[in-house]
Amino acid sequence: VLGVVVPLAGPAVVVAFVLAGIACLLSGLSYAELASALPSSGSVYSYAYASVGELIAWVVGWCLILEYGVGVAAVSVGWSEYLSAGLSDAFGLNIPDEFLRGPMQGGMFNLPAALLVLAVAFVVSAGAKESARINAALVVLKLLLIGFFLVVAFSGFDSANMTPFLPLGIAGVIAASGKLIFAYAGFDAAAVAGAEAKNPRKAVPVAIVGALTVITIIYTLVGLAAVGARPWQEFAGQQGEAVLAQIAQDVTGQTWPGEVIAVGAIVAITSVVIAVLYTLSRIIYTMSRDGLLPKRLGKLSPRTQTPVFTTWLLAIGLALLAALVPLNELAAAISLGTLVAFAVVNVAVLVLRRQQPDLERPFRVPLGPVIPVVAIIINIVLILGMPGATWIAFTVWLIAGLLIYFLYSRHRSEARYSSLDQTSGPPA
C-alpha cells in the first residue's frame, strides 16, 4: 500500500507506520489477554459474545468477515501486479491489461488474482498443520526478500528526498495511519488459531505481541528505505503496482534486483493469502456453529477436519471480488472494519475484568485499564479520519449485516453459552 499512503503523508509516512503499529500493538495486548483467557476459533467475535452480548458480537463478526474477506482479495490484487512485473522483466511475457485490471480500471477482470485465491483454497482445505508448514516456508522467503530490498534501497538513500518531512501536515499522517491498518490487519489470526494450538494460553499472547513488534520495525524500515530512495511525489498513481521492485530497479540501474523481488514476491505473498483465508474460514465456522450463519457453513470434512465447503464457497466469492475491484478501494474498507473490531476487543477487556475478575488470565494487559482506554481513543481517531467513500461502503455493509441478523441469525442463535465455554474449534 505504499502507493496509497505515501501520497497522503509524504516522507512522514515513516511516522504513519509507527503510529499504525502502536495502535495495533495496544489493541494486540488486549487480544493477547482475551486469547489467553478464552482461546477460541472465533477470535474477537467470541470475546465480544462473552462480554457485551450477541448483537455486538454479530457486528464484530460481520466486520471480521469484511476485514479478512476483502483482505484475501486485496492482497491477491497486489500479488497479480508482482506476477505481471516478474513475467515481463524476467521472461518478456506481458499479461494483457484486459486480464490484469478490473472493469473499474479499464480492463475486464484480474485473472491472476482470481486464480491465486482458488489455488490457495486447496492448501487451506488440506488442514491446519499442512497450511502452517507451507506458510512457514513462505514467510522465511518473504523475510529474505525484505532484507534484500532494504540493502538495495538504503544503498540509494538520498536525504534530500526526506525534506520537507511533513509536506501535507499532521492530518495527512493520520489519514495514512488509518489506511496502513490494512498492512497490519491479520495479526489476530493468531487468536483465531488458538483453538487449534497445543498450548494456546501461552502461545497466542507471544505470537500476537511478538509479531506486532517485529512487523512494526520491518514496516518502518521498508517505508524509510522506500521514501529515501524515491521522491515521495513519484509514488502517486502507483496503487497496487510492484513499487518495491521498481524502486530496486531504479536504484541499481539494473533489472535483476527488481526481477528478484518481483519473482520472489509471487511466491512469498502467497503466505498472506493462505493465513487470511484460513482465518476467515474459521471465523465463519464459529459463527455457524453458534447458529448465526447457516449450519452448512460449520460442517467439517471427515477426512481433513477442516471446513472444506466453507473454504471453497469463500474462495469462489473472493476470487470474483479480486477479479473485479482494485486494491486501493479494498484497502480502506478493510482498515475501517478492522478498527471497529479493535475498539470492541479493548471494550471486551474492560467489561470482562469487571464481570469476571476471577477468570484465569495467564496474560494481562499492563497498567490496568489505561492501555485499553488509550487504544479505544486511538482507534476512534483513526476511524473518524477515514474518507467519506469508505464510510459509505462500510455503512452499506453494516446495514446488510444488521438485516441478516434481525431477519435470520437472531431467531436461530444457539450461542447462549457461558463465556467459559468458547474454546472449541476445528481439531488441530
Image (cartoon, rainbow, N blue to C red):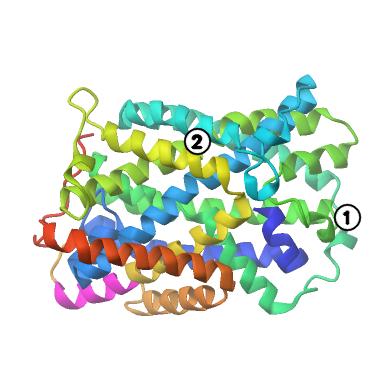
Front residue of 204 and 72? 72
**Residue at 56% across / 40% down in the picture?**
323
Vertically, is 302 above or below 192?
A: above
Q: Say the numbered circle drawn on residue 271.
A: 2
Residue 260, how many percent across, how many down? Answer: 73, 29
Name the amino acid, label 2.
Ser
Magenta-drawn stretch contains 352: yes
Q: Say whether residue 312 is left or right of residue 210.
A: left
* Highlighted range, magenta: 346-357
The Cα–Cα distance between marks 2 and 1, rounded to whole angstroms, is 32 Å
**Residue at 25% across / 64% down in the picture?**
57
Vertically, is 203 above or below 13?
A: above
Q: Say the numbered circle drawn on residue 158.
A: 1
Tag 2–tag 1 contact (CB < 8 Å):
no
Magenta-drawn stretch contains 20: no
Majority SS type along the magenta span: helix
Front residue of 195 and 112? 112
Label 2 element class: helix
Q: Say whether residue 267 is left or right of residue 4.
A: left
Residue 358, how many percent across, how many down? Answer: 13, 70
Which quadrant of the view contains residue 395? bottom left
Residue 367, how many percent across, how many down? Answer: 36, 76
**Residue at 23% across / 69% down in the picture?**
55
Front residue of 421 and 273? 273
Q: Earlier in the sequence, mark 2 or mark 1?
A: 1
Vertically, is 158 above or below 278?
A: below
